[in-house]
Image (cartoon, helix red, strand yellow):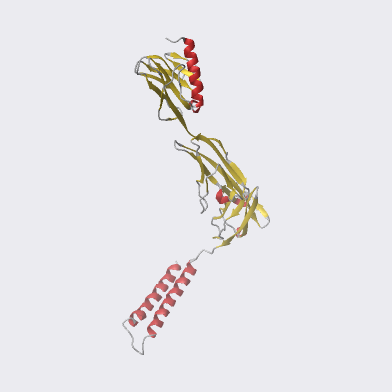
C-alpha cells in the first residue's frame, strides 16, 4: 500500500503531464494504459456524466480536471457544488457535473491505480452556447436624409452569424445585411419601420427588432373642389402625410378660420382635417386654403366651395321637352336616310310616337299648375 504522500506526488505529476498533453505514467512504472474517449459535446446548462471502468483490483482512483482533482475515490476535492459522485464500485467510477458552463470546457482524466499498473481515461468536453444578442440599437428617431447605423452584437459558441432584414416593406427593395452593423445612408421615409437582427448558430437563434422613425415635412394630397346648394351643408377635406403628424390651419383669403367661426366647424382626425358648413350662405362660396404644418416644414392646398343650382319644376319640364323633341327628330332623320322613297315598317311607329310625347308634355304642364 502506497502512502498518502505517494499519491499526492502521483496526482501532482498526473496533472502536470495532462497539462502538457503527455501520457500519464506512475512513478516507478514503465508502462500505463491510456484511453482516449470521443469528445462529449453538450449545451450550456445541461448535465454531464463522466465515467471510467475500474476492472482489476483498484487501489486508488481519481477524476481530474485540468489543474485540479475533482474526486479521489469517495473523497470530494472540488468545492464546486455542481460536481457530485454518482457511482463508485469495482466496475465503474462515475461523477456528474450539473448546469455545465463554458468555464467547464476542457480535458477530463480518470486516473486509476490497479494491482498491476496505472491507467488513464481522458475525454474532452465541448460546451456549446446558444446565441445571445447583448448589445442592440434602441428605437431611433432621425430626420429624412440622415445616415443611420444599426448595431447588433451577439455571442455564442459556435460564433453566431448576424443578419439584418426590414420587416415593414414600404419600398420595393428588400433591405438586408449580413453584418453586425447595418448602414442606411441618407435614409428616406420609405425606409422607416421595423428592422430585425438575427443571431444564429448550430444550437439556436436569437432575434431582436428595432423601430426606425423617419421625420419628414408634410405632403398635402390634392383635394377636389366642392359644390353645395344654398342652405345645405358642405364639407371640405384636407389630408396630409407627415412625421411628426401635421397640425392643420384653414384660411379664407388671408384670414384664418377658427373652429366655431361663423358657424363653421373644424375637426382634425390624425392625417385629415375637415371644414364643415352646416348652412351654406352666399358669403360662404369662394376659395379656401388648408395648411399642414410640422416642425420640419409646411404644405398647402386650395379648395373652392362653389354653388350648385338645385333643379326646379320648370327647369325639369324644359329639359324633358327638349329631350323628347331631340329624340323624335333623331328618329325622323334616321328614317329619311333610307334608299329612295322606300320606307320600312318603323315609319308609322315614329309618327305615332310623336303625338304621344306631346300629350305627355301637355299633361305634365297641366299638373304643374296645381
Residue 331, image x and y in percent?
39, 79
Residue 246, image x and y in percent?
61, 48
Q: Is residue 232 above or below residue 114?
A: below
Res. 195 in view: yes
Identify which residue, 189 or 161, lies in the foreground.
161
Furthest residue toward right: 254
Q: Quadrant of residue 342?
A: bottom left
Q: Is residue 362 left or right of residue 173?
A: left
Identify which residue, 105 or 368, lies in the foreground.
105
Q: Is residue 183 left or right of residue 156?
A: right
Identify which residue, 145 or 304, lies in the foreground.
145
Residue 75, image x and y in percent?
44, 13
Q: Quadrant of residue 320?
A: bottom left
Total number of numbered labels? Answer: 0
Res. 132 in view: no
Q: Is residue 126 above or below residue 80?
A: below
Screen quadrant of the N terminus: top left
Q: Is residue 144 above or below residue 113?
A: below
Q: Is residue 123 left or right of residue 239?
A: left
**Which residue sits at x=60%, y=46%?**
148
Q: Quadrant of residue 71?
A: top left
Furthest residue toward left: 345
Screen quadrant of the C terminus: bottom left
Identify which residue, 319 or 197, lies in the foreground.
197
Residue 72, image x and y in percent?
44, 15
Q: Is residue 338 left or right of residue 268?
A: left
Amino acid at each position: 500500500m502506497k502512502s498518502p504522500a505517494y499519491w499526492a506526488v502521483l496526482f501532482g505529476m498526473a496533472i502536470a503531464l495532462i497539462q502538457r498533453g503527455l501520457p500519464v505514467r506512475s512513478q516507478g512504472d514503465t508502462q500505463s494504459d491510456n484511453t482516449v474517449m470521443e469528445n462529449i459535446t453538450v449545451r450550456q446548462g445541461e448535465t454531464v456524466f463522466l465515467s471510467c471502468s475500474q476492472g482489476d483490483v483498484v487501489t486508488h482512483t481519481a477524476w481530474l480536471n485540468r489543474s485540479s482533482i475533482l474526486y479521489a475515490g469517495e473523497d470530494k476535492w472540488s468545492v464546486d457544488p455542481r460536481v457530485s459522485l454518482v457511482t463508485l464500485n469495482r466496475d465503474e467510477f462515475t461523477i456528474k457535473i450539473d448546469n455545465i458552463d463554458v468555464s467547464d470546457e476542457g480535458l477530463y482524466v480518470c486516473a486509476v491505480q490497479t494491482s498491476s499498473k496505472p491507467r488513464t481515461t481522458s475525454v474532452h468536453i465541448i460546451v456549446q452556447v446558444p446565441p445571445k444578442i447583448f448589445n442592440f440599437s434602441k428605437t431611433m428617431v432621425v430626420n429624412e436624409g440622415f445616415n443611420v447605423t444599426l448595431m447588433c452584437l451577439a455571442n455564442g459558441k459556435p460564433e453566431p452569424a448576424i443578419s439584418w432584414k426590414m420587416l415593414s416593406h414600404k419600398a420595393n427593395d428588400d433591405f438586408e445585411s449580413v453584418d453586425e452593423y447595418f448602414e442606411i445612408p441618407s435614409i428616406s421615409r420609405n425606409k422607416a419601420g421595423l428592422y430585425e437582427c438575427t443571431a444564429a448558430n448550430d444550437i439556436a437563434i436569437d432575434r431582436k427588432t428595432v423601430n426606425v422613425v423617419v421625420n419628414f415635412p408634410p405632403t398635402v394630397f390634392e383635394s377636389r373642389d366642392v359644390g353645395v346648394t344654398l342652405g345645405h351643408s358642405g364639407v371640405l377635406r384636407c389630408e396630409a402625410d407627415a412625421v411628426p403628424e401635421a397640425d392643420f390651419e384653414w384660411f379664407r383669403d388671408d384670414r384664418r378660420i377658427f373652429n366655431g367661426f361663423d358657424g363653421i366647424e373644424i375637426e382634425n382626425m390624425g392625417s385629415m382635417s375637415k371644414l364643415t358648413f352646416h348652412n351654406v350662405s352666399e358669403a360662404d362660396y369662394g376659395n379656401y386654403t388648408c395648411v399642414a404644418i410640422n416642425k420640419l416644414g409646411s404644405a398647402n392646398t386650395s379648395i373652392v366651395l362653389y354653388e350648385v343650382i338645385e333643379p326646379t319644376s320648370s327647369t325639369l319640364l324644359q329639359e324633358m321637352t327638349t329631350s323628347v323633341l331631340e329624340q323624335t327628330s333623331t328618329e325622323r332623320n334616321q328614317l329619311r336616310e333610307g334608299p329612295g322613297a322606300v320606307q320600312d315598317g318603323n315609319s308609322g311607329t315614329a309618327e305615332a310616337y310623336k303625338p304621344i310625347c306631346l300629350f305627355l308634355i301637355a299633361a305634365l304642364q297641366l299638373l304643374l299648375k296645381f
